[in-house]
Image: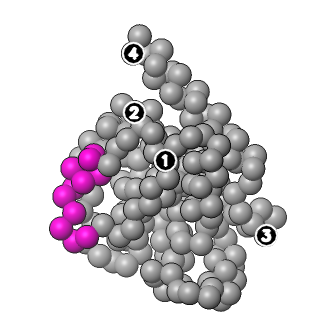
Amino acid sequence: MIIIEGADMTGKTSLCKDIELNAGLLYQHISKPPGSWPVPQGYIDLVNQHTVRDRFHLSDIAYKLATKNRLLLTAQTLDIIEAHLTMVGCFTVVITAEDCLLEQRFAKLQEREMYDLETILKANLQYKNLVDRKTTLSQHCNINYHIHCDKHKLWPTAEDLMTIISLYHEKLQCLEDALS
């Protein structure tokens, strides 16, 4: 299982579809979980070694903090989710971007995103905080690879794609070796 996390307009979906084509994993997108989403069981039920997920539990953290909504994930529930992800050899990628890039992309949109620009920028900051281990909850999140987009690197690259797939396979091999 590979999880691709990041704010809207960072290239998650394109990267997920490239992984699907190149690694043979099934692409699945998770939108905003409903208010009645059972935590952590809702996430545990979606853990599947043969998928590439466009968003998962870290999106819940970033967007809830960005919108100042009540966060349902706690350190304890994150530990439970991460344990299940570890058991299938999950590889988690976070994509962040410079604000000016997201602002340019948002201005060019033909159809609107789920969130407004201010919320997307705040979520992007929360993802950066998770990567940089600046929040209490980030200590309970396993992030294996970080892609940062800026004026020199506008989107995730083919090199990122190959690195992710290679590191993912290495992680699966280590898991297999540990279990045998």
> Which residue is depicted at the point 59% across and 72% down?
9
- Which of the numbered marks, if any, corresponds to residue 152? none
Among the two numbered marks 3 and 2 on one chain, the one whose residue lies closer to the N terminus: 2
State the image coordinates of residue 96 (x, y, percent, origin top left). Answer: 60, 63
Q: Earlier in the sequence, mark 1 or mark 2?
A: 1
Instruction: Determine contact: label 3, label 2, CB under 8 Å.
Output: no
Label 4 amino acid?
Leu
Dot 4: within a 10 Å radius of its alpha carbon, few (fewer than 14), some, or many (20 or more) residues? few
The answer to which quarter of the image holds residue 153 is bottom right
Horizontal side, residue 87 vs residue 174: left or right: left
Q: Earlier in the sequence, mark 2 or mark 4?
A: 2
Q: Which residue is mark 2?
A: 88
Local secondary structure at mark 3: loop
Inter-mark Cα distance, 4 to 3: 43 Å
Is disc 3 surrounded by few (<14), some (14 to 19) or many (20+) residues within 10 Å? Answer: few
Tell me whether circle 4 and circle 1 mark residues in contact (CB < 8 Å).
no
Identified at 44% across, 33% down, the residue is 89
SS at mark 1 in the image: strand
Query: What residue sits right under mark 4 in the picture?
Result: 179
Question: In percent of the image, x 37 and y 56: which residue is there?
Answer: 57
Q: Which residue is mark 3?
A: 151
Binning the other alpha carbons within 10 Å of mark 2 as few (below 14), some (14 to 19) or many (20 upward) gives: some
User: Residue 25 colored magenta?
Assistant: no
Amino acid at the residue labelled 1: Leu
Q: Which residue is mark 1?
A: 26
